[in-house]
Structure formats: structure tokens, C-alpha cells
Image (cartoon, rainbow, N blue to C red):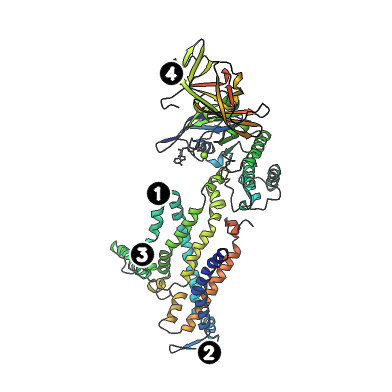
Amino acid sequence: MAYIHLDGVSKQYGSVWAVDRADMAIGKQEFVSLLGPSGSGKTTLLRIIAGLERPTQGRVLIDGEDVTELPPHRRGVAMVFQEFLLFPHRTVYENLAFPLRMLKLPKGEIEARVEWAVGILALRGLEKRYPNQLSGGQQQRVALGRGLVGRPKVLLLDEPLANLDRELRQEMEVEIRKHQTDLGIPFIYVTHNQEEALSMSDRIAVVRGGRIEDFASRTAIYDHPRTAFIAQFVGRSNRFTGTALISQGKTALCDHGVRIESAARPDIADGKRIAAYVKNEKIQLKPAAEMPADAANTLTATIRYVLLRGAYAEYVLGWTGGEIIVSRPRSEAAFAQGAEVACFWNEADIDLFPMTEDGR
Amino acid sequence: MKGRAAPAIFLGMPTVFLVGLFVLPLVSMVVLSVWRTENYHIIRDFSLHNYEVLATEGAYMTFLVRSLAMASAVSLICTLLAWPVAYGITLYGGRYKLLLTLAFAVPFLTGEVLRIIALQGLLGPAGLLNGLLLSLGAAPLRVIMYTNVASAIGLVYLYLPIVVTVIYLSLLNFDQRLIDAATIFGASPARAFFEITWPLNLFGTLIGFALCFIPCLSATLAPRFLGGPNGTLYGMAMAQQFGESGTWALGAAMGVVLFAVSLLLVIVVARLVDLRRTGFTGFGRG
Ligand SMILES: Nc1ncnc2c1ncn2[C@@H]1O[C@H](COP(=O)(O)OP(=O)(O)O)[C@@H](O)[C@H]1O
Ligand SMILES: [Mg+2]
């Protein structure tokens, strides 16, 4: 049963619809990400849920109650901000105690809960420090702690890791997901970083131009993108374009002599301009000599560079149509720069979309 | 070479500035205060006679106390008026913010004397306000004719722009999103103001208060033109020593007392206010 409902929520700034008819239902234990490029309306949507902005249209329900008209301090939500926004004139202890004091909890309870937050977030020994005496990672943990101590109905996180370096970010991802699971409260996590969204979320809402393009499980978003935008934005893909050819129960296209053939797509008319997306890691490689002549879903290419990414090798390949990128596990046989290889992929790994007028 | 010269220059400039404009005049004032003046001549014998006069002649103490009361009241009124004005501009000034800030400087385009005279024209017996009351058949307002109230109005009028500007600058540097954070975590708007906005702008408010309070203590023009018979303030009496009465040494002693009182107040305030608790980060990360 859904715990948070967004019902046709829209927000207009001047002539711009920052959020356009957003509908969402979020469960009580769910970790949901709002994923979209910068300026797509993620922050605005989060601020509407928090009560910091009033929607132009639509309603927000939390735990069955319509909170659309409630000011933020009566909603029982909490938020972690990208810029941390710790109170600079208060110590770590006081920052953590702030939500509890506002709840008018007894002193002993406040101490116990701050102690709990200090413990789970490894902040011990820092209680008397002021925010400007902390590192970025420590400030982030205090901000997270301040969000958790009050046991909010929902925790809203607005790009909380954007200001941290990569290594710290990955550590925090694990930590954030762990706290969400332990506390059993919904987290709504805003990010423009697909890796963050994919690593932590149960479900992902892809936001584009104020609209929710799709809201589905992370595997569905990744494996079966519903729109060309999602195929492009989530994961890393290679794109081929051409005109749709329907024959022998297949929908195919031809790009620079390479035939890309997928299962039949009755929704795409013959002769329409279409784009096919194949994810970097779905393309396989073998020596060019082993390539069967004239097969569909194969192309020959030359390796231009090899980038090493830990467990993966990323090949940048040149072919007649331009460049493609292929990512293979290091456990497979490696290819050297300059080698001629055959690239091939499965029919099922092709995502086909009709192209819009502007060629996207 | 460059590495060593730079700190010398950057510390040297304020030092020269302070010594030239502050320490030297102060020292000469202290020296003058222990000399005597007779018939417009300075006589260089050491004595504490001037301080004795200040301590024993009741009038000077009255002026000082009256000045302190006046300065406190005026600074308080200025601060109370300046806050909503400055806050309103930061919240709703929009693209006129800069223009509105500059507008505060407009009164400074005319001299202080001119502004006080203009106010005299407004508040006096035949002034605009009482003239209007009379023409409406009402009784004139006596409290604003040559009284301490009139002086106070004049001083508020003179220093309000400074206080507004200082508090406005403080609010401009204040991150309004901290209020968002406070309300999200359960603070009502009023609570957020007292928990966040007020303490984080206390330092600026105190500076605004001081920039009103200290010149009020030594104010001469407002009490002279608006104050009337019981309106003599300390600064006005001090100015007289350097003018009509020609008792410069006594005036210097008054100046030293004024400086000491101001300094004492600054120290007391500095003791009472923990800058850390105002979000002041000038201490570095230590
Ligand atoms: N207070 C505001 N006034 C006017 N326009 C705004 C305001 N806040 C956001 N916008 C506009 O709304 C759109 C969405 O902004 P935002 O929600 O911040 O996007 P995101 O968080 O996805 O980067 C942007 O075009 C932005 O310029
Ligand atoms: Mg944003």
C-alpha cells in the first residue's frame, strides 16, 4: 500500500513548468530515486514534497493525509541537502539535537538519540566541533544524522553526495542504503548520477523537462528503457540509426552496411526513421577472422584505445559508421590496440525507438 | 623576496592607518587632558584637575548619563526599525535590491547640518507637522518642540540609514536556505527566526548598533538644533569646550572619558557575545 502519493503535481515558474503533472506512489519501505539531468525539475519536486514550495496544481499525500496545505514544519519529513546546510553557529551535537528539540522530546531522550546517530555515523569525538571544523565527508554524515534522528515519515535527499569525491561517494552509498533498510522509512533520493540511482534504489523515476518519463524498478529502467531518452541517459550505449525494414517477422535497420535486426516491433511502421541502442557491455568481441560472413548484428572494427577500468576493459573501436565503445570483463581474452575484431550482440539486447523530428 | 615583502605590506598598511588616524590623535588628546588652558593658552603643567572637575561638577555627569540613555534609546529604535526594512529588501527586493541599497545613501548626499535644519523645519513650533495640526484646529504637539524627544527623532533620522545598510549587508550574506533547513526540521517560522536568523545576524546587528550608539554619544548638532534647554548632551558640551569656552584641556578630558566609556561598552559586549555562536568563522578551522 502506497505511503506517499503525488497526484498530478505541477509547478509553474513564470511561463516554465518546472514540474509537469507528476504522479507517483511510493511504498513505506521503498528507496526511490528521481534521476534526471540538471534543470529537469527534481529539486522542485522534492521541495514540493517537503512543503518548501506550494504546487501550482495537484496534491501531496503522506501516510493517507493530504499535506498539500501543510507548512514544512508540520509534515514530519526530513531532508539532506547538497550543500549540507548545517547550522554554522551550532556544534555537531546541537545540529543533531535540533530536530529533537523541535519535537520537544525530553532531555534524556534527546541525548540517547543523538548518541545513537553519533554511533551509527561514526561521528564520535566530533560532537563539540563546529561545522566549519569538519571535512566534507563528516559534514555529510552530520547532515544525514540530522535527517535520521527525528525518525521522519520520509527522508528527502537532494544530491547529497554531489560534493564528495568518488571514493567517499561509494562508501556513503552503501551507508545510506543500509540506514534506509535498518530504519524502514522511505527515502526519496534526487540525483543526476545514474550510478548512484542504480546502486541504491528499489525504483527509479526518470525525470525529463519536468515530466516523469518512467517510474519502474531499477532493473526495468536499465534493461528495458521505455524511451530513447532513458536508453541514452541510463547506462552507456552505442547508437545506430536508419530506416525501419520489416521482413520475415523482424524489425531491422541498416547503418553503414551493418544490419541490426531485432524481434518484430508491430508499433514501428516500415520506412520510419528509427534508432537502435546497444549497451556497451552487451556487445561481445572475437577475432575478426572468426566472423561469419554477412550475419546480422555484427560489425568489424579496429581497436583504437583500451581503457582499463578495474574489473573491466573499455575498448574504443573505429568502424565505417564512426566509433563504438565496448566494455568487457578482464577475465575474457584481451585484445591489443590496432587489432581487427568482430563485434556482435544478441537480438534481445537491442532497444529500438522511433526517432523524433529533431533526429533524436 | 616577494614572499617576505607581501605580509609586511599588508600588515604595514593597516598599522600606519591605525597609528596615524587613531593612536596619535588619542595620545595627543590624553596629553592635552592633563594640561590646562587659561585665556585661550595651553599651559603645560601636569595635573588631574580636569578629571576632578568632570567628577565633581554634577552637570557633566548628568550630560553623560543623559547621553548614554539617549544613545541607548536611539540605537535600540534604529535597530528595531532597521531590521524589518533590511529584511524586507532581502526577501522582496528582487531586482531592485541594488537600487534600494543605493537609495539608503541618498540622505548622505546632503550635509548633516542641512538635514537637521530640515528636520527643525518639520518638527518646530511653526513646522510642517505642528502647522498642519494647527490648521486642522488641533493643539500643537509640544513633545516635539525643542525637547529630548525631538533630539532623539533627529538622531534616529540621522543614523537609521547606516543601521539599515549594515543589517542589510549582514542579511545579504546570510544563507536563507538555512531557514528552509530549520523549518523542515520542525521549527515554526518564528522559531526559525530566533534559532537561526537572529543569532547568525547578531554580529552584524551589533555592529549596526555600535555605529549608531557611538556617534550618538558624541552627537552635537541634533541636540543643539532640536534639543532645547534641557537637551544638552555630552558631545555637545564637549564641543563647547573647544569652541566658545576655549577650555580645550577640559574638552580633551571629556573626550578621554567618552573613549573610555565606549571602550568599556565594547569590552562588555564582546564578553557577553560568543562570536562562535553567531556563525563567525574568522577564527579559521582551529
Ligand atoms: N524559484 C524558482 N524560480 C524560477 N524558476 C525556477 C525556480 N526554481 C527552479 N526553477 C526552474 O525550474 C526548473 C527546474 O529546476 P530544478 O527543480 O532546480 O531542477 P533540478 O533540481 O532537476 O536541476 C529549471 O528550469 C529552473 O530554472
Ligand atoms: Mg537540483
Q: CA distance from mark 4 to mark 3?
A: 72 Å
Q: Residue furthest top?
A: A248
Residues indicated by labels 1 and 3 sit on the same polypeptide chain = yes
Q: Chain of mark 4?
A: A
- The residue that disc 1 covers is B95
Tell me which amino acid carries mark 2.
Answer: Asp
Q: Which mark is residue A272?
A: 4
Q: Picture quarter containing residue B51? A: bottom right
Q: Relative to the observer, which residue lies in front, A321 or B204? A: A321
Residues indicated by labels 4 and 3 sit on the same polypeptide chain = no
Residues indicated by labels 1 and 4 sit on the same polypeptide chain = no
Q: CA distance from mark 3 to mark 2?
A: 45 Å
Q: CA distance from mark 1 to mark 2?
A: 63 Å
Which mark sits nearer the N-terminus, 1 or 3?
Answer: 1
Q: Is residue B168 above or below residue A249?
A: below
Tell me which amino acid carries mark 1.
Answer: Arg
Q: CA distance from mark 1 to mark 4?
A: 50 Å
- Between marks 1 and 4 in the image, the one whose residue lies nearer the viewer: 4
Q: Are marks 1 and 3 in contact (CB under 8 Å)?
A: no
Quadrant holding the N terminus of chain B = bottom right
Q: Is residue A265 above or below residue A50?
A: above
Residues indicated by labels 4 and 2 sit on the same polypeptide chain = no
- The residue that disc 2 covers is B45
Q: Chain of mark 1?
A: B
Per the image, label 4 sits on a secondary structure element best described as: loop
- Between marks 4 and 2 in the image, the one whose residue lies nearer the viewer: 4
- The residue that disc 3 covers is B109
